[in-house]
């Protein structure tokens, strides 16, 4: 049955995805006779829906897993979702608020019931959307970070690290998110440059008429001031040593102290010290034994300790404090100022430094194996430019604040006794036993109170490559069959912005618990940006709906469009034209097959076609070697472009044109059979990138059994190739293109045949390809010579070609055209010569690359000589 004239992705995509699912083709089980290849998905938040970053990331993962599967490896791509404590709790709180329910009116158990209901209803949306993209995940292995066994693993790791002394509890300055009402780790704080103001506030010196002016960006915190600090060597303030200043508005006296932390050049050269609301002030406060006064509530409003504007939001209070200062003439001036302000990575709220009792993980020692692994390339980062960033972070790592003031998440397994002491245990039963053992009591469950906080979400996902295969291992230390077979995984594909949040921590956990790396390679994708260079986001309204794009252009078109300009680590400047180009590629392939499928067969062999077949087989093997090299170096975009050019240019534009018969004429059987084999191999190398159309056409190419699929066939093996044959054909194609250009420039119809005269030392080459040149360029005869009157000429390599014209040649115009070509070739020759004069390039580049450049230089020199000779002939 003939294929429809138009390719309709939607019908085909749903059909084949269901077929793959029905036959369990994505599922993997340990098989000692096969080499494992495993990937764990960066688990998207259960709050998430598919966005452009997910599209790029998961397309790349699917390409890698499909190629590995075709290479005969036991491919296992584990999917799953992350519980996302802050984001999910915010969603549930908002949902309840719409129903008129406040979180504070509920107890923990009731709130969690609502949260689990929300998760069951919305939490799997993004995984279903990934299926539309063609993601060949092993859906039978789908995991969730709060599955019972994965939760147990997280708790067991906490208990273990606490026993080892690597987890501790203490009061420290933390990053506080007033919107999420929780502490954050340093890595969850994003800094943004914000247009702000410096407010110059006058502090009266106690008992004197003198005032000291302090510059601050945060006038709303003056009520928490406990000192004024000057530099001990600043002569401007020597007379103030030992004196006190009066805080404006509340008229409280505070000491003037000295500390060399003060920058004498910034502001007025002296600082107000507010230990509760600034990390540097906190350190100064410790050195000088100063009081800590926290005037902000957890939601960012002023509390009773502020004395003024109690209950007001911090930013509203700022404006009101400025107004009050002006009214009493204690605001000297305001000045525009740009501040680098920390924001919550999850809620985008401005962070408050806050002194708080939290749980921390000591990082200095535990990070060392993970630092070494990346530095010595045991774990390879692609592109390697991220190694320096990784090194800097790991060498300057701070202890990780792992507690969060939330209800949704893994509750910290610490149990408090009535006297305030605590025990850490995986269960309440173990906690009671420990309490009675360590504190010589007779405690019951009613006597113990579990910590209210939950663990940072990353404290579960850092175990992901282990826990998805064998969560019990993190308690028992004994590997099950899955972990022993699939771990360490092969490749991780993720975004650079979570290199430290997640990637580094997974490497830390891997070495801490298995003594091995969790993966071999980390491919860091770029950020998808719009045409203006902005990161795509819902808030900016600059991100297209991925599902709408799939509906319009097909999943194959979107996948290829995303990759057409997406080299590793570099941002992707998204343009819908790229996706349109992907759809056009689908149509090109579809029409190429329709052409082949429509050929009638004759038993007569044609030497022309055998030459074409020989060339394309060589070109295919050459391209396959290039594609494999790109994959080895994680140049996925380059691999796609190599496949794209092989199909669009080499196969469709040249090979099919060489072998296709005249209109409605038959083709010889050998050519058609060979062409189908070539097309089938092209579909195989294209399959990882465009799984749907390749499956459809592969099934059309031959009668297949139920349960057969292109995704389970063998990846083509790269054979040897003859570069001489490839170079010869390349030269012939350039000649044909030049002839077509002459036709276009002279207004000669493609249907008008003419003679071609060649001045060459290699007549054998043109005799070999005479039939092809004649067919592709509509040449009725080829002769050899160098004295052709009234002809237009051009040069390819060192050979000169003459096309006779009926009208008289404009010698001046012809001379001008040849001179332009000569100037261009001289420029090209100069560039190639300069590259070969570079010793670093010659010594470091692969031998094949250097040889290609030398060949280019030789060809250019020959062409220069031929052009110069031709210009001389014209006089």
Image (tube, rainbow, N blue to C red):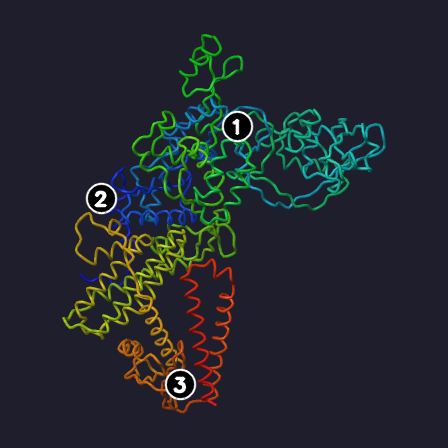
Return the residue at label 3. Answer: 792
* SS at mark 3 in the image: strand
x, y percent for residue 570 = 48, 52
Q: Is residue 253 above or below residue 748?
A: above
SS class, disc 1: strand
Q: Nearer the viewer, residue 485 or 122?
A: 485
Q: 775 or 624: nearer the eye?
A: 624
Which of label 2 and label 1 is nearer to you? 1
Kindly report which numbered mark, 2 or 3, lies closer to the viewer in this rendering: 3
Residue labelled with disc 2: 23
Residue 335 in the image: x percent, y percent? 72, 45
Q: Please give the name of the residue rendered at 38% of the width and 61% of the height, measured from the top-left corner.
A: 581
Please name the residue shown 69% across and 46% down the image: 336
Front position among marks 3 and 1: 3
Mark 1 surroundings: few (<14), some (14-19) or many (≥20) residues within 10 A:
many
* Quadrant of the image containing the N terminus: bottom left
Q: Quadrant of residue 212?
A: top right
- Marks 3 and 1, Cα distance to the nearest angstrom? 81 Å
Near mark 2 (Cα within 10 A), the count class, few <14, some 14-19 or many ≥20, is: few
Q: Is residue 423 left or right of residue 227?
A: left
Question: Observer-nearest residue: 425 or 43?
Answer: 425
């Amino acid at each position: 049955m003939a294929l429809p004239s138009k390719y309709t992705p939607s019908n085909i995509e749903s059909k084949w995805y269901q077929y793959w699912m029905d036959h369990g083709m994505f599922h993997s089980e340990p098989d000692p006779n096969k080499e494992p290849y495993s990937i764990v998905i960066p688990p998207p938040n259960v709050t998430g829906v598919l966005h452009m970053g997910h599209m790029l990331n998961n397309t790349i993962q699917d390409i890698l897993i499909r190629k590995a599967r075709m290479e005969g490896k036991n491919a296992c791509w584990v999917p799953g979702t992350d519980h996302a404590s802050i984001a999910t709790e915010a969603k549930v709180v908002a949902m309840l608020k719409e129903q008129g329910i406040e979180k504070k009116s509920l107890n923990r158990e009731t709130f969690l019931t609502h949260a689990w209901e929300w998760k069951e209803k919305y939490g799997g949306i993004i995984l279903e959307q990934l299926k539309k993209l063609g993601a060949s995940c092993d859906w039978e292995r789908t995991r969730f970070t709060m599955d019972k066994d994965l939760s147990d693993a997280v708790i067991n790791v906490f208990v273990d690290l606490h026993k080892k002394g690597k987890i501790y509890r203490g009061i420290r300055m933390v990053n506080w998110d007033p919107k999420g009402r929780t502490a954050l780790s340093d890595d969850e704080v994003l800094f943004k440059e914000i247009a702000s103001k410096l407010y110059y506030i006058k502090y009266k010196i106690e008992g004197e008429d003198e005032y000291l002016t302090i510059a601050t960006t945060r006038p709303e915190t003056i009520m928490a001031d406990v000192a004024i600090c000057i530099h001990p060597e600043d002569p401007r303030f020597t007379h103030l040593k030992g004196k006190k200043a009066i805080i404006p508005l509340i008229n409280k006296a505070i000491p003037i102290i000295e500390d060399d932390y003060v920058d004498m050049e910034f502001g007025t050269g002296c600082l107000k010290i507010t230990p509760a609301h600034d990390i540097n002030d906190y350190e100064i406060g410790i050195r000088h034994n100063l009081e800590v006064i926290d005037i902000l509530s957890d939601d960012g409003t002023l509390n009773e300790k502020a004395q003024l504007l109690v209950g007001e939001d911090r930013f509203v209070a700022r404006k009101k404090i400025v107004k009050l200062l002006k009214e009493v003439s204690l605001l000297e001036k305001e000045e525009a100022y740009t501040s680098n302000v920390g924001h919550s990575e999850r809620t985008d709220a401005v962070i408050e430094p806050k002194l708080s009792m939290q749980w921390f993980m000591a990082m200095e020692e535990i990070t060392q194996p993970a630092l070494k692994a990346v530095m010595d390339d045991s774990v390879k980062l692609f592109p390697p430019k991220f190694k320096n960033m990784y090194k800097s972070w790991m060498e300057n790592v701070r202890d990780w604040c792992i507690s969060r003031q939330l209800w949704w998440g893994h509750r910290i397994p610490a149990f408090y006794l009535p006297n305030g002491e605590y025990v850490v245990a995986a269960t309440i039963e173990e906690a009671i036993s420990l309490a009675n053992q360590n504190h010589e009591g007779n405690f019951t469950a009613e006597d113990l109170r579990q910590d209210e906080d939950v663990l940072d979400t990353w404290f579960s996902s850092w175990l992901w490559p282990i826990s998805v295969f064998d969560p019990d291992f993190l308690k028992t230390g004994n590997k099950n069959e899955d972990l022993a077979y699939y771990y360490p995984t092969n490749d991780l594909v993720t975004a650079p912005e979570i290199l430290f949040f997640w990637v580094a921590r997974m490497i830390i956990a891997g070495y801490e618990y298995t003594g091995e790396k969790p993966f071999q390679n980390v491919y860091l994708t770029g950020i998808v940006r719009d045409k203006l260079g902005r990161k795509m986001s819902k808030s900016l309204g600059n991100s297209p709906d991925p599902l709408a794009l799939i509906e319009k252009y097909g999943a194959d078109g979107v996948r290829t469009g995303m990759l057409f300009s997406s080299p590793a680590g570099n941002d992707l400047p998204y343009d819908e034209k790229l996706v349109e180009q992907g759809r056009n590629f689908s149509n090109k392939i579809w029409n190429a097959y329709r052409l082949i499928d429509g050929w009638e067969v004759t038993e007569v062999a044609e030497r022309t076609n055998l030459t074409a077949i020989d060339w394309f087989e060589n070109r295919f093997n050459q391209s396959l070697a290039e594609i494999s090299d790109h994959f080895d170096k994680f140049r996925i975009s380059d691999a796609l472009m190599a496949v794209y050019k092989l199909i669009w240019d080499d196969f469709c534009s040249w090979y099919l044109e060489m072998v296709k018969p005249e209109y409605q004429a038959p083709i010889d059987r050998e050519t058609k059979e060979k062409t189908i084999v070539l097309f089938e191999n092209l579909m195989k190398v294209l399959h990882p990138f465009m799984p749907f159309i390749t499956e459809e056409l592969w099934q059309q190419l031959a009668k297949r059994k139920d349960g057969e699929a292109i995704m389970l066939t063998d990846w083509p093996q790269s054979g040897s190739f003859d570069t001489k044959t490839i170079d010869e054909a390349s030269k012939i194609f350039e000649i044909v293109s030049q002839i077509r250009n002459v036709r276009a420039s002279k207004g000669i119809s493609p249907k008008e045949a003419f003679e071609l005269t060649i001045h060459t030392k290699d007549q054998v080459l043109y005799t070999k390809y005479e039939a092809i040149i004649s067919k592709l360029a509509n040449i009725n005869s080829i002769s050899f010579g160098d004295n052709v009157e009234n002809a237009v000429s051009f040069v390819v390599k060192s050979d000169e070609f003459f096309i006779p014209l009926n009208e008289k040649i404009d010698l001046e115009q012809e001379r001008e055209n040849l001179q332009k070509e000569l100037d261009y070739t001289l420029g090209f020759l100069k560039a190639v010569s300069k590259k070969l004069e570079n010793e670093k390039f010659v010594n470091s580049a692969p031998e094949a690359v250097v040889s290609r450049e030398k060949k280019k230089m030789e060809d250019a020199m020959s062409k220069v000589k031929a052009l110069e000779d031709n210009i001389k002939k014209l006089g």
